[in-house]
Image (cartoon, rainbow, N blue to C red):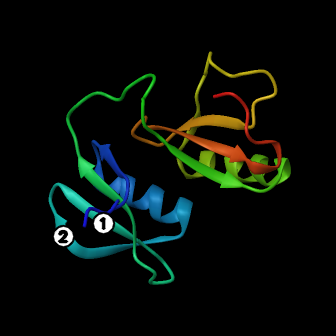
Amino acid sequence: MLRLGFPVIGVSDLRRAVTFWTTALDLAETEEWASARWRTLDHADGSGHALGLMYSESPVEEYPRLHLDLVVDTAEEQAAEIARLVELGAHQVDWNNYPPEADFVVLADPDGNRFCVVDLSRAPSDS
């Protein structure tokens, strides 16, 4: 039976990506399938795989067709998490496709991979 696994992000610096994503999402690096070109990150509570990081030489997409949505419950929590993620090395993206009263903010990880922080109390906006 076919099952959905977990998202994989292409990165140019595995160590930097492991540090960012484990801290950002309270994940734990595992040795399962670990190699010079791959890292698996698990949920810290031991409930399973959460994210894969794969070394990639391809350029970051300016408008990726697939991305991560990280969710929070309030606008205050959204602002606090954005500030925390920026402290960890993310940066806010100058995004020209925001709808009016957007419930999401576009950030990029230290490798430039785009992701959104979504305030579920205002969702869904047209994204």
Residue drawn at x 52%, y 64% is 23
Mark 2 surroundings within 10 Å by alpha-carbon count, few (fewer than 14), some (14 through 19), many (20 or more) = few
Dot 2 falls on a residue whose secondary structure is: strand
User: Percent position (x, y) of residue 26?
Assistant: 54, 69
Q: Is residue 84 visible?
A: no
> Is 37 on the left-hand or right-hand side of 73?
left
Label 1–label 2 contact, CB within 8 A: yes
Residue drawn at x 75%, y 30% is 102
Q: Between 101 and 54, which is closer to the camera in this rendering?
A: 101
Mark 1 belongs to which amino acid? Thr
User: Percent position (x, y) of residue 80?
Assistant: 76, 52
- Taking the view exactly as shown, the residue that stands out farthest to the front is 1
Q: Is residue 109 visible?
A: yes
Mark 1 surroundings within 10 Å by alpha-carbon count, few (fewer than 14), some (14 through 19), many (20 or more) = many
Mark 2 belongs to which amino acid? Trp
Residue drawn at x 32%, y 58% is 52
> Disc 2 designates what residue?
33
Tag count: 2
